[in-house]
Structures are given as structure tokens and as C-alpha cells.
Amino acid sequence: MSLAMNKHSMNTEILWFMHKSQTQICKHISSESCALTHSKLAFGSVINITNNGIVLIHNHRIYNSIQNSNEWMMSLIHTLENSLDSMKQSSMQKCIYGIARKTIETIHEKLSKYENETTVILAVRDTVFFMKDDVGTTSLGYTLNPFCLSHTHYSNEIDPMCIYSYNRRSGTLDSWLKHSSTLVNAYISKINSISKYITIEKHSEYAYLKKHLEILNDHEFIGKYALENNLQAKDEVNEFIQIFHNSVMHRIVSGDICIFFSGGVDSMLLAVFMHHSAAPKQKIYLINTSFGQSSDRDTGKMRYEELCLMFKQRTFVFIENDVGIKMLREAETHIYELIYPKTKPMDFNIAATLFFSAKEARKYSSVAYAGSGADELFGGYSRYTKCEFRDSMLFDLLTISHHNLCRDNRVMSDNQIECRYPFLDSKLIQYSLSISDNMIFGSGLNKLIIREVLRRYGFDNAANVPKKAMQYGSGAFKMENKHSTYNKNHQ
């Protein structure tokens, strides 16, 4: 999905070429204020254009509900439309902007209650407003000169903590914090601890976070949040179990279930909680993707056998999704185009694993589940064993949308898979910011709290599985490193 605004002519359509997929399905729409190219990449998106040219685009669906979010959003848009009809004079532009801004903020406030993966674009007269969900699980970025919003092939990532506006006539881009978001407020209250990461050249791509440091001077804000976030002494493991169970229940589908399953502690915990949340007749497909011989295949099979032994009444299906050299080479250029502006081999390896996992999962469901976010929340990376690991974890959490999720969303959406992330529930994120260090590391192991939950459910062997990065565990790194032609041709 892309939306372009022409600074010079209100009626000139701007063609935005998204990517070269042969299966791409596009349609081009223009209104008084913008030109729009819509593709299958913007999975599940809804387009609304009113009589006076207001454009609302979103991909929001309420989990497990027959309620139509588009209906109440359009009721807000019609209220906005009625207000604009009474403001014909150019002197009223500031009022128009203010009403439109209030509308997008109200949309965010309502949408955030549902915890869905969301992007929203609202074009009103000379201004386009845009945002994504507070965690940033969906891909949406922008390019300037000419201005264009797109699901893929853009130059700049969007900060999920902010709402943006762009004025076509002045060429001005603006953004402001989502002040109604409890999760954003939690992030801002702790952001000073990662200032050392934000300000170094190595992390210049995350420079947009610098402006949030200024908010720490607002003592009223900090005091208010500290009061609201005053946690009582608790059983941290039991609290995790309750929050994670609620997250899974909120996101579970009514049909068969697909999990991207390496057999590691994150995907194993997902499988356990999916079993306890799903109806007895729902099958659980464990998608295990392997590029040649891989440790994930061996680990996945062992964990699958343990699940079948523990939950005999449940139908688990272990899917051996084998990707050969020919398949990888044929998809290589396409995957690199999807992950742009990411270009590193590591990004490709992770994206390739998810691309082929999503392609296989689509045979069984339109929704898949992944353990993304568990490493950032509960200390999964080896670099966290160094001093000040909580600061490093927070930095990775605040940049997870930019660093991982947008890339992953593009490659999975290309296969028409909606991926849901139970670990990235806002309540679980806030919980992770409050837990003690000894629930993260100890006895030479990471993610202790996840391992302890697995033990409580009777999976002692699974609880001791060491962390292995996706690209290494699946074998994608080894195969790409040995047989890649893309990097050789683009050096």
C-alpha cells in the first residue's frame, strides 16, 4: 500500500512502484488530496474515500469479535466531514488541522484498547496523518521528495510511539507522542537510561528517539506515571502466567492454529499456552523450517514428541518445511526487495526463514503465531550478559519495530499471512520492565522466567534448551553464505 501527495497539483496522480513481484495485485485511486496505490502487500487493508476527498486507510481488525472497527472509524470521519463543510475559508485552515488531528488521536485511543497490529492513514485537505500500533508490529514508512507513504520500499521508518502529519503545501513533516498510551508513557519514563545508545554514531538510524529525552524534563509527567506504575510485591512467575494466558486468549483464532516452531523455549511456550487456550477440536500445526540439516529440526522434533506425550487429547501436526538451494535462489532477489531498506545478510537470513515459514503456514491458516519479542523482553541475546543489560534490553525493545518487526511483517504479508505476537502484548511489555534481574539471568541461563514457566507445566527438558538465533538454528545462514548470488551481483 502506498499513498503519495503531490505538492504542486491537486489532480496529478503519482505512480509509486512498490516492488517487482509477479504476483502483485495493484489498483490506483486518486482523490483531491492524494494519489493511492494499493497492493496485496497491505494485507487486510480497508480504503474509504468520502465525497469531499477525505481518505481513511487502515488494516485494523478486532480480534475474536464481530464488531466492525471500520464502522465506528467512519462515524468519526463523517463528523469530521460535517465540520469541514462549514469551513470553506482559507483562514480556517488551523481549525481544520486541529479537528483532523483530534480525529486521528481519537482513532488511536480507541484502537489501542484492542492491542491489534494496525496502521492508519488519514488524508484531509492538505495534510496526511499517519501512525502504527504502539509496539510497531506493522510495516509503514515514508519517503520525502516526493512525499510517499508505503508498506514497502520506503526510506524512513515510523516511530511507533508517535503520530505523524505531513503538509503537502509547506512540505512540513511533524510528529508528536501518543500521550494517551500507557505503554508509550512507560517507555518515556525509562528512556533516559538508553541515552548512551541513542547518541552514538553506530545507532544513528535511531536518532529519532533523541527528541523523547526532552520529555524527561517534565517532572509532572514522570511523577504521574511513577504513581500509576507503583507495583506491589508479587509472585512474578504467576503474574507472567496470567498475563501471557490473557494475551494468547485475546489473539487466538477459531480455526486451526499455526505456530512458527523451532523447538526453542519461546515457541514451546506458545505451543503449551495455545493448547490450554484452544478448543479441543482445533489442530495445532508446528511449522518447522529448515535449510538443509539444522539444529532446529532436531530440537523441534523432540519438543513435538513431548507435546504429544503430555497432551494426548490434542492433535499436534509437525510440519517439516524443507527449503532447498534452488528455492532459496529463486526467491532471493524478491526477499531482498521486500526487506528494503534492510540490506544486510543477517536480515535476509531471518527474513528468508519467515518468508518460507509463512508460505507453508498459508496452506493451513491465514494467521500464524511467532515468539518475536521474547528475547528483548526477557533477556534472550548473548550480549545481555554484560553489565547494564537492562539498558541494552530496553534499547532493543524501543527499536524492535525499526530493527525487526517491519521487515518481518513485509515478508509474511507477501504470503498473505497475518502474524500475531503474544509476547508483544502491552501488559506483558510493561510487566517485563518491572521484573527483577534474577528472573532474567541465573545459573548460566537466560530468559529464566520463561524456563521456569515451562518447568511448572512439566517440560523440564524443554526448559533447558539453549538459545540459538533463528538464522543459525534454521540453517539459513549456512546456505545463504555458501550459495548466495545476490550479494555477489550487488557488490
Image (cartoon, rainbow, N blue to C red):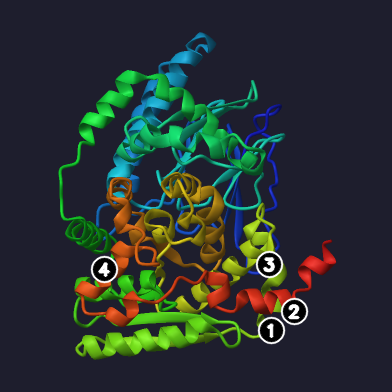
Q: Which mark is residue 452?
A: 4
Q: Which mark is residue 369?
A: none
State the separation of the CA atoms marked 2 and 1: 7 Å
Q: Which residue is mark 2?
A: 483
Mark positioned earlier in the residue sequence (4 or 1) = 1
Are circles 3 and 4 on residues that touch, CB within 8 Å? no
Q: Amino acid at mark 4?
A: Glu
Q: Nearer the viewer, mark 4 or mark 1?
A: 4
Are circles 2 and 1 on residues that touch, CB within 8 Å? yes
Q: Is residue 38 above or below residue 23?
A: above
Image point (43%, 64%), residue name? 418
Q: Which mark is residue 334?
A: 3
Q: Is residue 91 above or below residue 55?
A: above
Are circles 4 and 1 on residues that touch, CB within 8 Å? no
Residue 460 shown left or right of residue 30 in the figure: left
Image point (27%, 44%), residue name? 113
Q: Amino acid at mark 2?
A: His
In the rendered image, residue 327, in percent from the top left (x then y), is placed at 66, 82
Q: Amino acid at mark 1?
A: Ile
